[in-house]
Amino acid sequence: MTFYSCDNYLDINDSPNNPTSELVNPKLALSAAISRPYRTLATTANELGNVWMNNWGGNVNQYTSAYSTEYSLQVDNDFYSGIWNNLFVYTANLQNIINYNSPDYDDHKAIAKIMKTYYFQYLVDLYGDIPYSEAHDPSILNAKYDDDLTVYRNLYSQLEEAIAMIDNAPLNTIAVGDEDPVFAGDMAMWKKFANTVKLRILLRESVYAQSHADSQTYLNSKFASLAGADFITSDVTINPGYNNGSATQQNPYYALYGFDTAGNPGTRRQVVVATKHAVEFLNGTEPNTTFDNRISKLYAPITGGSYVGVIQGTQGAGNVPPALSFLGSGLIVGGDQDGSLMTLAESNFLQSEAVLRGYMSGDAKALFQSGIQASFDMYGVSANYASYIATSNSISGIGWDGTANKVEAIMTQKWIALNGINGIESYIEYVRTGFPSTGVSTVAITPTGKLPKRLLYPTSELTGNTANVPSVSLSQIFNQGAFWSVP
């Protein structure tokens, strides 16, 4: 038990295939099994998404080569490889919980299924075909790659199984408590979260279904089974006990983009600044926009109170403002701040889109505006929501009534709501729908004029799983994404 003392409560065996992991019961393992993959999602994946979606730029006044590869789009097999490597390694801890040889932990196992699905969806979305059916099996050194559509269907099934496990848990099932860093053992909330992840999985396939009849039949069936389902009613956050006691116990987002325990800037604090596009979009100076109070939470004003961003790819004295806005107080709160797994705003936008596409009943506009309100509420600027709706509603691209293609309005507002929080989700939704069109950097080398549709498989797979890893070139990633990506 000493290993799980307060100094190590955020840790778990770095090697999930270590035999000692079999001796750690689900109650002891759950917190770290959920939290470790989150570190990668909140930092590495989030940063890439925010850069590619033109929210974040590099502080070229201090770091001349900041984001040069991200801007150029000339990626290689080592580009953001931590997304693949870490999500695969650390989700094995969730699989260990699922496989634990005891009938007394059904609720813990259901949570592990939900969270493994949550993380694996991002692997499919970013890479397409992945090892899945043979993943996390220590007896298989070179796992085969599974078709991404097949994996997606199984992910949905895993969520169904998780909900069934919760509903049918035996009376002697060990209760989940504070070891759950998300809902503290509230299994009703876990079911709502599972339903919301289901909704996101189904909507990813919706554009693909427009030209594939079998997919449309599948979606119709699954959406019918979701009729009347409860979705999340508040932000889904994660906090296994983040605090300022040590660097490893701080919220990983804050530790990287905020400050260390001594108050010194984190390693990315001075690097990340606002982009000119994001600032002008939010302060209403870009065409088809209006002033958005959330800017005061997303970015920090420079001396004088104004917000200033950089044009991605621009460098040189005289070309970049001498002072740029860093990340704001709504994102950089404290070492003990909650992490974000899914916002209520995102859930409402998902529901709005599902109603709009005819898959669910309801009021798409009301759900859309509820998504905006949830974002305002999250940042503590709810008093400004009504005026924002009044001025934005008729504006094309951001307002419901003013936008011909309502999907564009939904995706643009989702992009604003996820700015800084989950940039990789915004990027994935851009690949799926084509919205919002935030542009590429001034130095981007792209045959399509757009962002890539996926990432390259990492070097670790090319060297360690050579016989199975698909061959994908740099040129292909601009045209070939996951099965659901738009042409």
Image (spheres, rainbow, N blue to C red):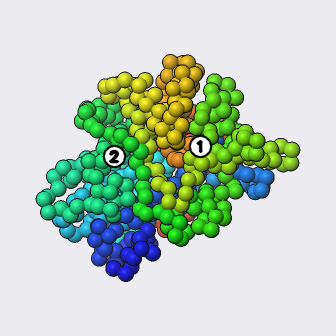
Give yes or no for contact between labels 2 and 1 (Cβ–Cβ under 8 Å).
no
Name the residue rendered at 24%, 58% in the picture.
107
In the image, taking residue 87 as reference, residue 300 lies left or right, namely right
Q: Name the residue nearer the viewer: 464 or 80.
A: 80
Name the residue rendered at 65%, 58% in the picture.
268
Q: Which residue is mark 1?
A: 297
Residue 206 location, x and y as percent?
A: 40, 33
In the image, taking residue 405 as reference, residue 266 lies left or right, namely right
Above or below 263: residue 166: above
Residue 229 location, x and y as percent?
A: 27, 37
Mark 2 residue element: helix
Residue 463 location, x and y as percent?
A: 52, 67
Name the residue rendered at 34%, 68% in the picture.
29
| Residues at marks 2 and 1, CA–CA distance in whole angstroms | 26 Å
Mark 1 residue element: helix
Which of pointers 2 and 1 lies earlier in the amino acid sequence?
A: 2
Q: Amino acid at mark 1?
A: Lys
Name the residue rendered at 60%, 43% in the picture.
298
Q: Amino acid at mark 2?
A: Phe
Answer yes or no: is residue 87 visible.
no
Q: Name the residue nearer the viewer: 250 or 162.
A: 250
Q: Name the residue nearer the viewer: 293 or 442.
A: 293
Residue pushed farthest bottom? Answer: 2
Instruction: Tell me, for residue 277, which label it has, or none.
Output: none
Q: Which residue is mark 2?
A: 193
Give the quarter of the figure containing the N terminus. bottom left
Residue 233 location, x and y as percent?
A: 36, 40
Label 1: how many Cα within 10 Å (few below 14, some 14–19, many 20+): some
Above or below 371: residue 304: below
In the image, taking residue 96 as reference, residue 438 lies left or right, namely right
